[in-house]
């Protein structure tokens, strides 16, 4: 935990000084007011006491990821907001805003790169491995739904023709979606071939 004690003419001025020293967003800090500002003496001109606060910040994977992503977006000139959520295993960062296609890239390549760099940056700060999933306007969910529909449609074509189909190169997560969506089909077999980043899923009839 990082802590800064600051004074100011007002409580907010003291808090702002503490936030600046810690170099974090105001929303992520805890504030303890140690002394309220007062004015003593004739007409309040003498014996003024400044406000004194203790500002503390504890590193949090979601906060660190958000800070990193906001810095990247700012450097790219992209206006974006971030929402943080957490489940039992992963931290989820969803980026929202106008014209965010540049953060997604072709087939999500840029988004995957941003997610990879975010995980590296947070792991370096915390000295431990944390799984952070970065999404843009729900792109990953839409992409998953698209891949499931594609897998079902192509598996039907394989059943009709008996000819195996090789899909476009995909990252490990997307290949897993294809495999999982067809794993219960008793007539279809899926496997991957090739090397990353050109590794592809193959949909074929089961032998025998």
Image: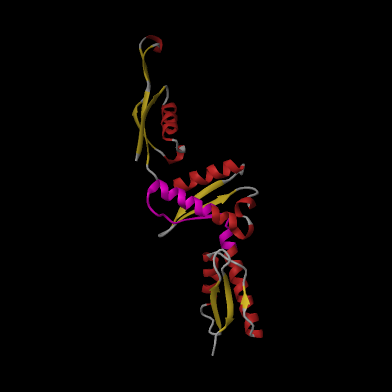
Q: Is residue 155 above or below residue 109?
A: below
Q: Residue furthest top?
A: 42
Residue 186 on image: x %, y %: 53, 84
Question: Residue at position x 44%, y 49% from top?
Answer: 122
Q: Is residue 184 above or below residue 44?
A: below
Q: Which of 172/11 is in front? A: 172
Image quadrant in which the C terminus is located: bottom right
Q: Quadrant of residue 189?
A: bottom right
Residue 26 on image: x %, y %: 46, 37
Magenta segment? 114-142
Q: Which of 38/187 is in front? A: 187
Question: Residue at position x 62%, y 80% from top?
Answer: 164
Question: Residue at position x 41%, y 35% from top?
Answer: 22
Residue 67 on image: x %, y %: 49, 43
Q: Residue furthest bottom?
A: 208
Q: Which of 91/198 is in front? A: 198
Determine if the magenta segment contains residue 162: no
Q: Is residue 42 above or below residue 11?
A: above
Q: Is residue 132 above or below residue 15?
A: below
Q: Would residue 32 be found to the left or right of residue 24 on screen? A: left
Q: Would residue 124 be found to the left or right of residue 150 on screen? A: left
Residue 198 on image: x %, y %: 58, 66
Q: Quadrant of residue 171?
A: bottom right
Q: Would residue 60 be found to the left or right of residue 97 on screen? A: left
Q: Residue furthest left?
A: 34
- Number of disc labels: 0
Question: Residue at position x 64%, y 83% from top?
Answer: 163
Image quadrant in which the N terminus is located: top left
């Amino acid at each position: 935990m990082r802590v800064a004690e600051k004074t100011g003419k007002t409580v907010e001025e003291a808090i702002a000084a503490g936030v600046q020293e810690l170099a974090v967003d105001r929303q992520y800090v805890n504030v303890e007011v140690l002394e309220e500002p007062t004015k003593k003496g004739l007409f309040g001109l003498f014996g003024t006491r400044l406000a004194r606060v203790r500002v503390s910040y504890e590193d949090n994977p979601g906060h660190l990821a958000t800070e990193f992503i906001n810095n990247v977006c700012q450097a790219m000139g992209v206006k974006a907001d971030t929402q943080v959520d957490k489940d039992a295993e992963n931290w989820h960062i969803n980026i929202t805003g106008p014209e965010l296609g540049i953060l997604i890239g072709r087939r999500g390549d840029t988004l995957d790169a941003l997610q990879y760099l975010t995980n590296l940056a947070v792991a370096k700060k915390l000295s431990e491995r944390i799984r952070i999933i970065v999404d843009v306007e729900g792109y990953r969910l839409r992409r998953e739904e698209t891949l499931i529909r594609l897998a079902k449609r192509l598996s039907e074509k394989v059943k009709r023709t008996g000819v195996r189909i090789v899909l476009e190169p995909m990252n490990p997560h997307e290949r897993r979606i294809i495999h999982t969506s067809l794993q219960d089909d008793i007539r279809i077999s899926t496997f991957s071939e090739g090397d990353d980043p050109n590794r592809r899923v193959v949909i074929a009839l089961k032998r025998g």
